[in-house]
Amino acid sequence: MKSVLTLFVLSLALGSPARAAEVHVAKISGTIEGGVAAFVIRVMDEAESGGAAAVIFEIDTPGGALDAALDIRDAILYSDVKTIAFINPRAISAGALISLATDHIIMTEGGTIGAATAVDMQGNKASEKIISYFRNEMKATAEKTGRSSKLAEAMVDEDVDIEDLAPKGKLLTLTTEEAVEHGIAEHKIAEKNESEKLIAVLKYYDLVQASIIHQSTNWAEQAVRYLTHPYLASLLMTLGFLGLLFEIQSPGWGIGGSIGLICLGLFFGSHLLINLANWTEILIFLLGIALIFIDLFFVMGFGLLAIPGGLLILTSLFLSLMGRFELWTWDDISTVLTPLFMAIILTGVLGLLILRSLPDSRMWRRLVLDTEEKASEGYVAAPYSDLLGASGTAFTDLRPGGTGLFKNRRISVSTEGDYLAKDTPITVVEVEGSRVIVRQAEDT
């Protein structure tokens, strides 16, 4: 009986083929920015949750934002999934940091890695504070992945002297041959065809039999990349300011305020997703909005709370554009303030032009009823305004409402509260729209 049970279990095991290992392949190309960081973080999360055998990043980048590079570095470096950087053909600046964070580096023939000095938002060499910070990030990353920390430092700091590779005063950039020789990369891919290159990478790491999952940015990540672009971010800020400006100029709540909040929501939401903004900035922004609303609807006179509210909104926008506090420099602060002030100035100019020209536009006339009913055209404010002071008689008992007779015109009337019997002489003392007030006529 025991042998039969054993054969049954073996037959089940043999009849159920093992699930093929999964390998995720993702491209990191172009400028490194927040949208790329969001994409890489998602890829790593899916690989970990799905138990992937490895993640291969095909890298071809000249570098980019340090904030985004650090987010990518952390997502890769502290993952339990095996990661492979396939440099095809270059990993410069932030790309070098990302590559060093992976467990394995393999390079195509004629590739390069290095030149990772930090620059500010204007492309100038960053301050010593930022260079020191980035140098230590590169060093710590290389140490954790078992690579030369000195070579990593030399990619950032030109004062690090590497004999025969990067003399003092020159940043280190390694070719494929040099990277393999000095242990930064493990192997060189000689294949020319792109599909053959990937197969060669899989063969080298014994992953040919794996199920390949090609990852690409989804619509949300692509939208975030567009929304966080400096030009579009400035436009969102401008539209947000304009919407709030129009809302302040009009009573109640309308389309201007809704559009303003939507634009500012897109600004903060996109920056929140790529970790440029956090909930602190969101709360500061919401507090600013709340102060403006309280000032508009509950406080007499604009300014008591609205001005501090506006300053809080500007502060939240500034903090969202600056990113990580440890990377702040005076140059970056001035660079961020420029588009912020430009958005404010643009808001003022456009707001003034729109407020002056919009009432005369065809679109405005379609939205707003501006027809005047003039007395010269036969319109009157009240249909019985000519009865004021007229004398007549009560056609019915007035209790106090009833019907009055004025020169053969029967008009619904009302007394001031008194009861008047039928045929009592009356005089019109007040006309309010279609409401005619009468009282008993005085004896003459």
Image: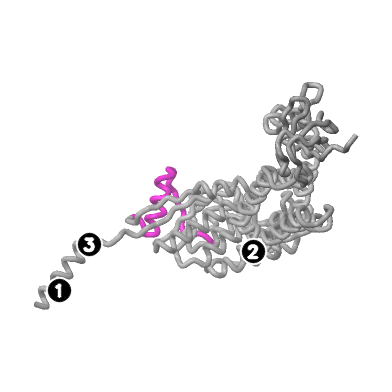
* Nearer to the camera, 55 or 34: 34
Residue 186 among those drawn in magenta: yes
Kind of residue at disc 3: Ser
* Nearer to the camera, 286 or 419: 419
Q: Which residue is mark 3?
A: 16
Q: Position of residue 53 (x, y in %)?
A: 39, 62
Q: CA distance from mark 2 to mark 1?
A: 60 Å
Q: Residue furthest top?
A: 377
Magenta stretch in the rendered image: 182-208
Q: CA distance from mark 3 to mark 2?
A: 51 Å
Is residue 168 in view from this perspective? no
Q: Is residue 367 above or below residue 200?
A: above
Q: Which residue is mark 2?
A: 153
Q: Which residue is mark 1?
A: 6
Q: Earlier in the sequence, mark 3 or mark 1?
A: 1
Q: CA distance from mark 3 to mark 1?
A: 16 Å
